Amino acid sequence: MFKGILSPVITILDKNGKLDFNGNKILINRLIDNGINGLLFLGSIGEFFALSKEEKQEFIRFVVRVVNKRVPVLIGTGGTVLDEVIELTRFAVQEGADAVVVISPYYFKLDSETIYRYYASLAQSTSLPIMLYNFPDRTAVDLAPELVLRLAKEFKHIVAIKDTVDNISHTRKLIQVVKAERPDFCVLSGFDEYLIPNLMAGGDGILGGLTNVIPHVFVDLMKAYTEKDLEKVAAAQGQISILMNLYEVSQPFVAAIKGAVAQMGVPITPGVKAPAAALTSQQMQVIQKLLIKANVLETL
């Protein structure tokens, strides 16, 4: 259901830390115009953890209207309070979203039965397609292939998983175990540089943050892979490999990705929600050098 190049969209804020609707509209149109196959709002890179319920609802209503069915709209509704997850999912349904992406509960290291109950309760509350979100580096819990298969077999509208694990073997095992019984189940990698290994293992694509910066490179890479143009595959993979270093420029990495988007000429303010800090001039210089090295930004 969700294949190819999907973007977890950064949330553009103004200088006061409020939602910048014009900036978000510009970014959304840029991603769609460059051929992105689907947009996730309120994911990790979308700062879901720092936005209020009211901000999330206002933003959901806005993005669904702006996208206007041009590509699928996915909404991140995960959290630690199940009732709030269900409530926000129902709101996403009401506003016309195409699917929700739901991270597993975080803070406590939960066992598989507890995680099963979490997702099962959500699935029983909605008919909207659900994408599981596995990010053990943030949740302290890994969604094992056996648990994912159990959920996928029991609930047909659990249709996909974003596997944000820096180990392609983990994603490969998910693909092998789950697709053996649910061939239509989509497995996306959360690490940008794993697009080609994902596809070669039988997966369906990526949902990665660098798509905000260089959507055209990822779309061209997908096309080159499909056409078996290994020279273009290698060139695009090289650019992505260089830009993976953006994730190490700031903590959290959201600011660096926003800074890179701004450096690419998109008229946005690269601000982030507190307590994260704004980029320093030195960090902006590092970002610029990486973009130039990757040959996606001309030398000034």
Image (tube, grey):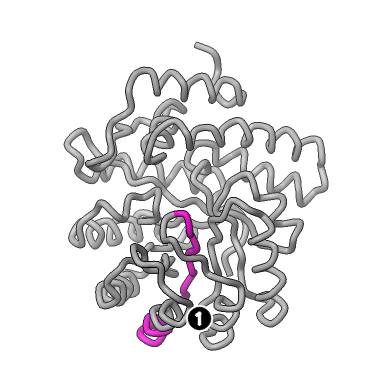
Residue at the image point whose x is 40% and y is 33% from the top = 250
Residue 43 versus residue 3: which sits nearer the camera? 43
257 to the left or right of 270 = right
Q: Which residue is mark 1?
A: 157
Please provide percent x and percent y for residue 125: 35, 85
- Quarter of the picture holding the N terminus: bottom right
Q: Quadrant of residue 123?
A: bottom left
Q: Quadrant of residue 177?
A: bottom right
Please provide percent x and percent y for residue 284: 40, 22
Q: Secondary structure at mark 1?
A: loop
| Residue 182 belongs to magenta span | no
Q: Residues within 10 Å of mark 1 (few under 14, many from 20)?
A: some
Indicate whether 286 appears above or below 275: above
Q: Which residues are magenta?
A: 120-137
290 to the left or right of 173 = left
Residue at the image point whose x is 37% and y is 41% from the top = 252
Residue at the image point whose x is 69% and y is 82% from the top = 181
Residue 265 versus residue 172: which sits nearer the camera? 172
Can residue 127 be seen? no
Residue at the image point whose x is 65% and y is 49% from the top = 194
